[in-house]
Amino acid sequence: MFLAMNCTLEKGQVVILPVAFDKTTSYGKGTDKGPAALLEASKYIELYDIETDTEMCRAGIHTAPELRPVTSEEMLKVTYEAVGQYIDQGKFVVTLGGEHSISYAPIRAHAEKYGSLSVLQLDAHSDLHPALGGNPYSHGSVMARVKTIPEVENVVAVGIRSMAEREKEEMEKEDVFFAHQLDGEAWMDQVIDRLSDRVYLSFDVDAFDSSLMPSTGTPEPGGLFWNPALKLLKKVIEKRSLVGFDVVELSPIPGMHAPDYLAAKLVYKILSYLFEPKDSRNGDR
């Protein structure tokens, strides 16, 4: 259970949905163990968040039973159905991966529920391959599939620093913020300007620099660091309506706890920003 909280579905405003799935990853394996590692690490997070001066967990966080699908088709079906059911019950849904291919299902469910929205993709890779290994629903093809969802206005990608040349054909240049371009802070407002009023966040942990996040299938150097990433997310939540998010691609390394803890803390920080009282934001506390 996230934060070791035994919160019932009825009392929880937030549902954490773990999806243990790793079938199409290209290099390092083990993302199916990511959700369990993240949940285990979350037990050691202090419930009080200094920055927001809140204990967001008081809103209630219910951890749903872990999904363990076998095939891509099954994964997409059961994840889509589960997320849709929780949304229909008025819950804010956080999906934990597992490989990045799982993100298509919650994005589709949120788009169909909320209508037109932007997807904010924090990632080292563009994930725009038509198919990898003959699978159009592979982890490297997820954003190509997301772009086909009718209600998705655009995909705004941040932190990209690895891609195939053929993926350039699928990119909207104004919606891509390459890692080497992220100097200073002006880019954060530029990202927000590209987002519609409603936003779904898909956070692949390899968006972080490999020195922070070695526990992922393809740890790329030159990525985001903790404070800039959080500053962007806080700005997005302040200026747009975040309807849901996922955190994916954690591939735990036995005996190395820091990356698991980072991923768990990331989830709690996003929720803390989301549930921070509006009148306490921007230093008005």
Image (cartoon, rainbow, N blue to C red):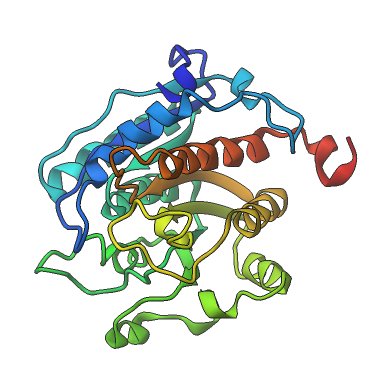
96 left or right, relative to 274: left
Choose top left, top right, bottom left or bottom right for residue 65.
Answer: top left
| Quarter of the figure that contains the C terminus | top right
Q: Residue at x 63, y 18 (%)?
A: 58
174 left or right, relative to 104: right
Choose top left, top right, bottom left or bottom right for residue 67.
Answer: top left
Residue 73 versus residue 33 in the image, above or below: below
Q: Is residue 178 visible?
A: no
Instruction: Tell me where residue 277 appears, x and y as whole percent.
Output: 76, 32
- Comparing 211 with 159, the one in front is 211
Residue 159 versus residue 212 in the image, above or below: below
Instruction: Tell me where residue 46 appears, x and y as whole percent.
Output: 60, 25
Q: Is residue 273 visible?
A: yes
| Quarter of the figure that contains the N terminus | top left
- Comparing 130 with 225, the one in front is 225
Q: Residue furthest right?
A: 284
Instruction: Tell me where residue 4 appears, x and y as whole percent.
Output: 45, 17
Instruction: Tell me where residue 71 appears, x and y as whole percent.
Output: 10, 46
Q: Residue furthest front?
A: 255
- Comparing 159 with 43, the one in front is 43
Choose top left, top right, bottom left or bottom right for residue 70.
Answer: top left
Q: Residue at x 28, y 39 (%)?
A: 254
How many numbered discs sit on the rendered protein? 0
7 left or right, relative to 236: left
